Image: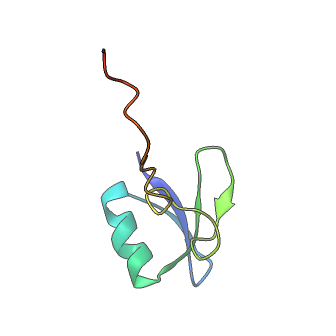
Amino acid sequence: MPLLVKYKNNSIEYIPKDCFQYLLDSGCIIAFKRSNGDWVDPNVGPIRGQGTTNSYDGRERRSRW
């Protein structure tokens, strides 16, 4: 599924998902559109995969016995 992105020159374009990370890392993208319709500034908004590690240090609770 292509992603809608906005470049530094304010042009808007659909790009393939496999190009997104490269363009994001190179700083070409100033915003992208989420599936809910919100525009996200990658320098401000949360991006999937950059959150917490979600590690759990407590006792294992899923064991059968």
**Which residue is rendered at x = 66% and y = 60% of the image?**
39
Question: Which of the 4 quarters of the picture holds residue 24?
Answer: bottom left
Q: Looking at this view, is 48 or 62 the one in front?
A: 62
Name the outermost residue toward the top: 65
How many labels were placed on the picture? Answer: 0
The percent coordinates of residue 8 (x first, y second) are 57, 83
Horizontal relation, residue 35 to residue 16: left or right: right
Picture quarter with the N terminus: top left
Q: Looking at this view, is 43 or 28 the one in front?
A: 43
The percent coordinates of residue 2 (x first, y second) are 42, 51
According to the image, what is the colour scheme of the structure? rainbow
**Which residue is rendered at x = 58% and y = 74% of the image?**
11
Question: Which of the 4 quarters of the picture holds residue 60?
Answer: top left
Q: Is residue 7 above or below residue 64?
A: below
Q: Looking at this view, is 56 or 38 the one in front?
A: 56
Q: Looking at this view, is 46 or 8 the one in front?
A: 46
**Which residue is rendered at x = 41% and y = 27% of the image?**
61
The percent coordinates of residue 55 (x first, y second) are 42, 50
Question: Which of the 4 quarters of the picture holds residue 22?
Answer: bottom left
Picture quarter with the C terminus: top left
Horizontal relation, residue 63 to residue 52: left or right: left
**Which residue is rendered at x = 52% and y = 61% of the image?**
47
